[in-house]
Each structure stands twice: as structure tokens, then as C-alpha cells.
Image (spheres, rainbow, N blue to C red):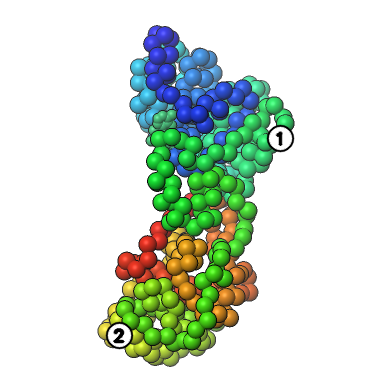
Amino acid sequence: MRQRTRLKIKLYRPHPGQAKIHLSKARFRIVACGRRFGKTLLAVNEIVKQAWERPGTTNFWIAPTYAQSKIALNLVLRHFRRAVREVNKSELWVELLSGGRIDFKSAERPDNLRGFGIHFVVIDEAGYIRDEVWKEVVRPALIDTRGRLLAIGTPKGRNWFYELWLKGQGDDPDYKSWQMPTWVNPYIPRSEIEELRRTLPERVFRQEIEAEFLEESGGVFRNWKACVQEYDLPARAEGSVSIGVDLAKYEDFTVIVAVDETGRVVYFDRFNQIDWALQKARILKAYSHFPNATVVVDATGVGDPIYEDLRRVGVRVVPYKFTPSSKEVLINTLSVAIENQEVVFPPIPELLRELQAFEYQITKSGRVKMGAPPGLHDDTVIALALAVWGLRRSGGLAVGSFVVG
Ligand SMILES: Nc1ncnc2c1ncn2[C@@H]1O[C@H](COP(=O)(O)OP(=O)(O)OP(=O)(O)O)[C@@H](O)[C@H]1O
Ligand SMILES: [Mg+2]
């Protein structure tokens, strides 16, 4: 039996990047690699080998969610069907013909992980697993067993995964870590990587593809200075024009920014009146300036009736609803356009100031928050982003969208 399963295991041919990890004898192996590197597949092979060779041991696969754990179980079934004696798809465990067993767990309810000594544990998508799960639950479970860890994932902020990864770069022989980009996987076409390099914000590419642990916070817009040109506003525009409007809701500013189909800012207006009749008049003024314009307006909450009102009076208007992830898409779209110099604007002081200050922060849980630092405004950036997004929507700019986390 053992013979036959060995044969099955051989069907997986690790690529050179995966082979390095399999060959390491370190007790704690921390693998930070780009998306689609082959992390999950390599870890599935490791855990099956561990469980197969050591019947009677506790082998856990821990993923951020139940659904993700189930994917790993299904991978085991797909690759090692003939090595499996019994499987329970609701409790998520498999028993191998050798007597070895693997339990698939979710970190959503860490208390379910307590009460075990663990001999071998894979933590998948480690960047999404909270510090407490590792520090308070899993690490202590490895003490009396001298259990081993294989943590895999794409970097996500600077949590325990990052701390262990750093330790693995030092000279403690128990800890070994790797950092490899997606393209080490020879099964990923190089053209895909180049496409992503072109369409992802540089910051996102560095994290997701190059597997870099980004600073916890930093500026979002790079090289915006290269987009600045001297010219007067409002400028004439021949083809279609996209007008982004960020409405003042409380005490901030209403900003109206128009870009033409080449990505040139042709109109700019900023004022701090929250009276709707006034805001509407200024939007209509911008709209009437260009024969072929579409307005993109923030239609979140109180913005929604405003969107409706504009629509009723015959304005060509597109609503944009803000959620944390739709805001990220919006900002990423602008940031790619700026990095590729697909937008051009005159040196409008508020715009330059806000572009410079606009920052991202990665929270402990790995979420990316973007906006102006406390006390500063970001309405001008948001209005420009809405205008650029409107342009992209109408096919004017080839920029991608990508949400992290
Ligand atoms: N050694 C290999 N031989 C053949 N195909 C491989 C190999 N390693 C990875 N792949 C393929 O590459 C793809 C990505 O693999 P996998 O899902 O393991 O990557 P991942 O790094 O976990 O990705 P994600 O970041 O999406 O979780 C899959 O289609 C997988 O079958
Ligand atoms: Mg994976």
C-alpha cells in the first residue's frame, strides 16, 4: 500500500521554488510567495507526507475560513485519492491508508483549535490569520509535541506572519523563511505577469506578485509630478468628457473635475457650500460646458437622492456607491492611470497637495484603508478618481481594478 501511495505522491513534480521548501528540515518554515506560486499545492503534498509517515499524530490544516479549508481537503482527495481510507466532508478530515490523519480547520473559531497537541500544522493564507490564533492557540499546541509549522501565504501587512518570516531570515536553524515572486512558478505564463504589472498599482503588484511585506502605511500615488502640465482651465474638449463629482456632505468641499477622453483634466471647481440647490447649479454649469459629458457622482447615502435629481433633470449621470472595496477599486484605477501617465493636470494647488498626502494604511487584520491623513481633505482626489473611473468605464482608459483583502 505504502508503495502505491509513494507512486501517487511522485505524480507531483515540485517546481524549483517549491523544491527548496520541501528540502528544508527547519521546524518552522515560513513561505511568503506571490499569488498562484503553488503554495497550497506544495503544502498539501507536505501534510499528506507527514500524516502518511506518522500514523497516530495530529496534523492540522488551518485556513482563514471553513470554505478555504474545504478547498485544501478537496485538493488532497484530487491528488491522493488512492491513499485515502476514509473522508468526512462535513467535519473536514481524512484518514489515510497508513493510518495517518489530517484535520482541516478554520481560524474563524479559534477555540475549536484548543485542547490538542499538534505535531504538524499548515497555516494557509497566513497573512489573513489573526495574531492571537498563532500566538495564543497554535504555538502553544506545538510545545510538548515539538510540533512543526509550515506557514504559507501572500504578505498582508505586518502581523505574526511577517514577524516569523523575519525570524526565518536570521540564523536560528529552527526557523527558515522564503520570499519568491509568482513567476517562479513555471506554469504561469510570463505574459500574464506583464499584464498585471501594467494594470495593477505598483504597490499592489509588489505585495501580491513580488510577495513584499509592504510598510504599514505609505503614499498611494507615485510619480504624480510627471502628470503635471501648465495650461489654463477650463480647457476646450473635443470628444466625450467624464465629470467626477465629490459632494460636500457636512463641512468638507464639493469638487467637480472633468477629464477629456485623452485623460486631460479640462475643468475644475471646488467650493464649500452644502446647499444642494447651489451644488446642483455648479454641476449643471460644468455639464453645460461640454457637449458630450457624463457625470459620475458619489451616490452613497444622501448622495443617492442627489443622483436621482440629476437624472430627473436630464443629466447623463452614473452613480458610484462607496464601500471599502469599491473605494479601493476607484483609488487603484486612479493610481494606475497616474503611474502610467494616462492623466494630465495643471498645477492646481489643492489637487497636488491632496495627491501628495493621500495614504494607505494596512490594518492589523490586513485590510487596506485609503484616504487623507486626519485633518486633511481628499475630495479633490476622489473627484478626479471618479472622473477617471468614468472614462475607463466608457472604454477611454485601459486600466484594471484589483481589490486586496
Ligand atoms: N509543481 C506544479 N506542477 C504543476 N502545476 C502546479 C505546480 N505548482 C503549482 N501548480 C499550479 O499552479 C496553480 C497555483 O497553485 P496553488 O493554488 O497551489 O497556488 P497558491 O500559491 O496557493 O495560489 P493562491 O495565491 O491563489 O492561493 C494551480 O493551477 C496549480 O495546479
Ligand atoms: Mg493558495
Identify which amino acid the numbered label 1 is placed on.
Answer: Gly
Identify which amino acid the numbered label 2 is placed on.
Answer: Pro
* Residue in the image at 40% along x and 58% along y: 400
Q: Quadrant of the N terminus?
A: top left
Q: Is mark 1 within 8 Å of ligand 1?
A: no
Of residues 189 and 80, the one drawn nearer to the viewer in this rendering: 189
Of residues 243 and 235, the one drawn nearer to the viewer in this rendering: 235
Disc 2 or disc 1, which is closer to the eye?
2
Residue pointed to by mark 2: 291
* Residue in the image at 70% along x and 26% along y: 173
Q: Which mark is residue 343?
A: none
Alpha carbon separation for disc pair 2 and 1: 63 Å
Residue 65 location, x and y as percent? 46, 41
10 Å neighbourhood of mark 1: few (<14), some, or many (≥20)? Answer: few
The residue positioned farthest toward the right in the image shown: 171
10 Å neighbourhood of mark 2: few (<14), some, or many (≥20)? Answer: few
Q: Are marks 2 and 1 in contact (CB under 8 Å)?
A: no
